[in-house]
Amino acid sequence: MTDSEAASSPAEEDASDGSFFRLTRTSGRQATDEGPAVLRLLENDCLPFVFACDHPLRLFKLWPSIGTSLFDQATSHYTELVIDCEEHDGREDGGMRRFWERIPLEAASRWGKELSHAHGREKGRAGGSLQCIAFERTAPTIYPHEHQAHCVAMGGNPDGTIAMRLFPALNDRVYSQAPQRTQPTLPPVPATPPTLPSLTKIIGVWTAQGQAIARGWHTPALEEVTGGTDGPGTGAPHMGGILCSSRCLKRLMVPMRPGDLASACTAFPLPPVGQRGPLARLQCLILELSDADENDQLNELTAVLVARGCRRTIKSLHIQFVDVNVVDSSLVHTLQALSSFVSAVATSPDIPVTYSPIRVFNLALLHDLPPGPLPPFVARALVTLAKGAFRVQWQSEAAHLSHPMDMSTRSAKDLAASLTFDTAIQVELIDTPGFTPPPNAPSPRPSVLDHLQEGRAFPSRSCCPSGQSGPEPDLFVYSHIASEVLGVLADKMGQPLQELTVPAGSERALAALRGREVRRVRVMWGRSVGLGDGAAAGALQTTHSIDIELRVPRDANAIEYVHSSILSLLKLRAAELSLRVQPTIGTFTHYFVRDMMQHRFPDGEMDGYRISCTTEEALRGNGQIVITAARIDSLPDMSGVVPLTDESLTELRSDFPSIPPEALVQLHPADHRALHESGRRPVDVNELIHRAGMDSS
């Protein structure tokens, strides 16, 4: 019937509170309004639309009223199946899975044709039927007459060609009256499993579904099985029940360990001699790997796939690492086993392989590489993993002290020269857990690190257009025998280094940076007396700032200890020094120590530094003292600045009101440090007056 006839129908006049809603359909058949809502729903041929747009858990409660005849159909035209196992109220609800398992395939095909204009559907429970579909996508379908009026109002050209009819929508009252079903169970596997000759794709399978997916379906045309995003499970051996009847499988994208995938693929029959196997068309795989020994599992998987026809057919591979946190020498062994697997089943050793990112890359694997050539597949994998690492490490271990570090293989040198850490934000030098270097142990210098690309191995604005790579990574040193490694990596990272964090007592680490420009050095809590008296003395003249966190020992005199620390730190000759002191609780208050430090530096200067002393309150304890020292020759040039008095400030503000008040800084001639700390640029008053006069004119 026409739109005008539909608009004047009695059914529409009775529609309220979501009792009815419209669906476009070419048949023009109108629903009956007699009987209970559930029964009227059963008599309506638009029932599929209700099932398609509402939440399956709520519809599942209506199953006893609807009867089982609705779920006894099948079709040869169904081509795609989506298994949706969303969580409901924080738990997986088996009712949803079972509902979609038994939904009639004929109805699914018909719904798809009727909803050809519905491009998206919201997931999860909604308050009403219409809310489950993105309304802006389906408004022309559900409310065409209103959509036409809207188009006319907006100056558009409405379609106005489709007929309409009414059918009842399910509301919360109907749901509450529906019979409740507790602990629904899977129906028994039929004696003669259904055959779906046109089914080509299954989406949303994940292995934790276990026996729920082993229904014995015959799917000879199945080409693709894609896993869900819920993560790995324990039902991988049952995967064979849904795969084994296919002779066209091309993409098996369900994450499984090599051993589990081998178990699933053993369900495929072995082909007769001289014939292609059931996996002869397999092209894409996804595997889960760990840093454990995967060699045996990969060998088993290789034998199973090759015996069933997968001989050099794989064109792409995705590797998903499980419980792998560091790219190190143990992962290299796994990659070597994977290289043998690829050689047996892939069309070429150079097939596209994608890897899930691993956050940490340990550079020590370069020194630990076995002798002999490195397989090209392994080298490419390590280069790819290096590009996605967020943190680059060097782990020092006991063997580095007893074995020569100036020997490296050709493969290690070539690999080092090809590594780039494009996304690295940290470079850290640590000791292997459980290894404590002996006192005064030498600092090894691994020669293989010399082959890293200087200025290109790590992100740097200087080598990327427009600084697209982001800020340079920060350096963290937690090892006392890594000063040589620190020097090499600092050279490779380019100039200047942004930030370096070292433990207390790292004089050798600071000395390794002699002559290099560093923006900021942070020394963690410790005893810093003598830090500038040894090898590090004068090493950091090109360093912008050094922040040191100092704890005063309980048996030390806080006044003398802090004073000695300041005199020692001044020998580092950095542009700025900041010493944060936490006195021992119960010895001296931080106010007393602050006053004594001000007494020790009455003029506020020492050895070419301008020194200030303040306090910061702490939530616990006595708070802390903050002593800052700025090298006078690094302070901004104040020669063009005219000191302002109260009278001159008032006169300027009166004569030139357009001058921003914050631009006028009252400056005492001797208080250069205040201007420097404020972050304001020194201003020549004559220039300021001239600019203000130009603005006013």
Image (cartoon, rainbow, N blue to C red):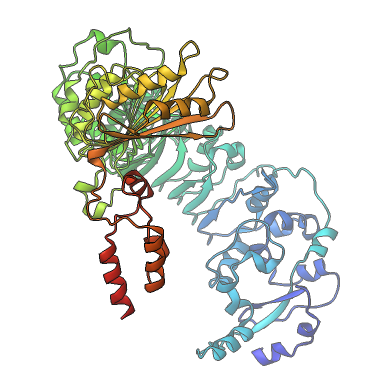
Task: Report if residue 348 is visible in the image.
Answer: no
Which residue is painted at 72% across and 79% down in the image? 166
Task: Residue at the far left: name it.
Answer: 410
Relative image position of residue 170 (x, y in whole percent): 76, 67
Residue 665 placement: quadrant: bottom left
656 sits to left or right of 141: left
Residue 569 lies, with reference to residue 402, above or below; the image says below
Q: Nearer the viewer, residue 618 or 292?
A: 618
Residue placed most toward the observer, 305 or 148: 148
Q: Position of residue 212 (x, y in %)?
A: 62, 41
Work out which quarter of the rendered image holds the C terminus and state it: bottom left
* Residue 551 x %, y %: 45, 21
Quadrant placement of the N terminus: bottom right
Residue 31 figure quarter: bottom right
Which residue in the rendered view is the most extreme toward the front? 647
Residue 116: in sight, yes or no? yes
Q: Is residue 603 left or right of residue 495?
A: right
* Whether residue 573 is situated above or below residue 656 in the rendered picture: above
Count of marks placed on residues? 0
Q: Residue 433 at x, y = what percent? A: 41, 16
Nearest the viewer among 473 and 359 is 473
Residue 503 location, quadrant: top left
Image point (24%, 22%), residue name: 536
Relative height, residue 162 to residue 630 (above, below): below
